Amino acid sequence: MKYILSAFIVLFMVSCSADDDFSNKDYSEENALEIQAYISNNNLNAYGTNSGLYYVIEEQGSGAAITATSDVTVKYKAMLTDGTVLDENLEDMISLNLQYVIPGWTEGLQYFNEGGSGMLLVPAHLAYGSNDYQDIPGGSVIVFEIEVIDLKVENEKEILDYISENELTAQASDSGLYYVIEEQGTGEQPNSSSEISVIYKGYFTDGTVFDHSNDTGVSFNVSNVIEGFKEGITYFKVGGKGKLLIPSHLAYGRYGSQTIPAGAVLIFDVELLDVN
């Protein structure tokens, strides 16, 4: 059931307006007892906050600190304390901004760094309120198992695995870009604002092609392309060939695009034909 994250975005207005129309019961005491029983029954090392939220840190994470306005990329599982699964997204990454999620997430994720994992035990007043919301009974405590993805670390591992599996000789730049020079070329070398002609093919690490030029190449200004391509093409001269292995922060970022998944590593085969 893939409604939880979309519900995050509209939830606070929905639950507040619903509570205006119906009885606004305070479940705080009941929820606190329910959470404490869940912690005890599952032998969790949990911390409580003044808001009523409880959280469990399994891995703190060594990446960037998270704030109330951060963009984060997560994997998660949401369930009731009786084990009923409401939603889960443990395979694919989801990106969101913490200004637009339920208060329990806005607060709770700030106790982690990127790369961290653990649990959030969220009482109703920090989640879906005192009234029924879709399949969530009013007053429910929601338990979230979460993993906050450190995209730079994950992307680099994916790139290094690809390099190893394909026996490539690659070089790394300070930006996080990896590149393979198959032929250096002997002509002019472009810069970040050059007009170039190039043959290229873009694909993911699983081999799925998302874009390609024709066999005679295309022309464009380097300043108009993603950062990884803009940097990478400058390592070649006219006549050069190779690969660019681009992490998401130098491509389409944690949100992706219509054809590029969130946080995706991109690979480009390139042949530089001309610098105009």
Image: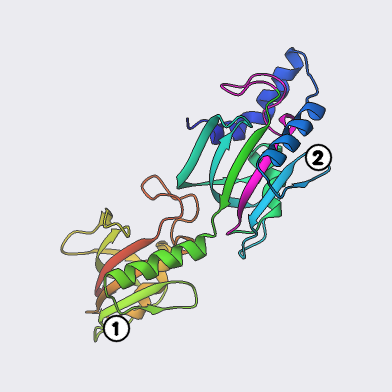
For label 2, count other residues whose C-alpha is less than 10 Å away and answer few (under 14), some (14-19) or many (20+). Answer: some
**Side of 43 relative to 28 (left or right):** left
| Residue beneath the point at 75% across and 30% down | 31
Magenta stretch bounds: 115-138
| Residue beneath the point at 66% across and 24% down | 14
Q: Earlier in the sequence, mark 2 or mark 1?
A: 2
**Side of 237 relative to 32 (left or right):** left
Relative to residue 152, is residue 14 depicted above or below? above
Q: Mark yes or no: residue 81 visible.
A: yes
Q: Amino acid at mark 2?
A: Ser
Residue 68 in picture, x, y percent from top left: 71, 49
Q: Which residue is mark 1?
A: 188
Q: Mark yes or no: residue 227 visible.
A: no
Q: Amino acid at mark 1?
A: Glu
| Residue beneath the point at 69% across and 44% down | 106
Residue 259 in picture, x, y percent from top left: 36, 47
> Is 265 covered by the magenta stretch?
no
Q: Secondary structure at mark 1?
A: loop
Q: Secondary structure at mark 2?
A: loop
Residue 134 in picture, x, y percent from top left: 57, 21
Q: Closer to the camera: disc 2 or disc 1? A: 2
Q: Which residue is mark 2?
A: 51
Q: CA distance from mark 2 to mark 1?
A: 62 Å
**Side of 113 relative to 37 (left or right):** left
Relative to residue 58, is residue 91 depicted above or below? above
Residue 228 in picture, x, y percent from top left: 42, 67
**Side of 147 relative to 200 (left or right):** right
Relative to residue 28, is residue 258 depicted above or below? below
> Is 137 covered by the magenta stretch?
yes
For label 1, count other residues whose C-alpha is less than 10 Å away and answer few (under 14), some (14-19) or many (20+). Answer: some
| Residue beneath the point at 25% across and 68% down | 198
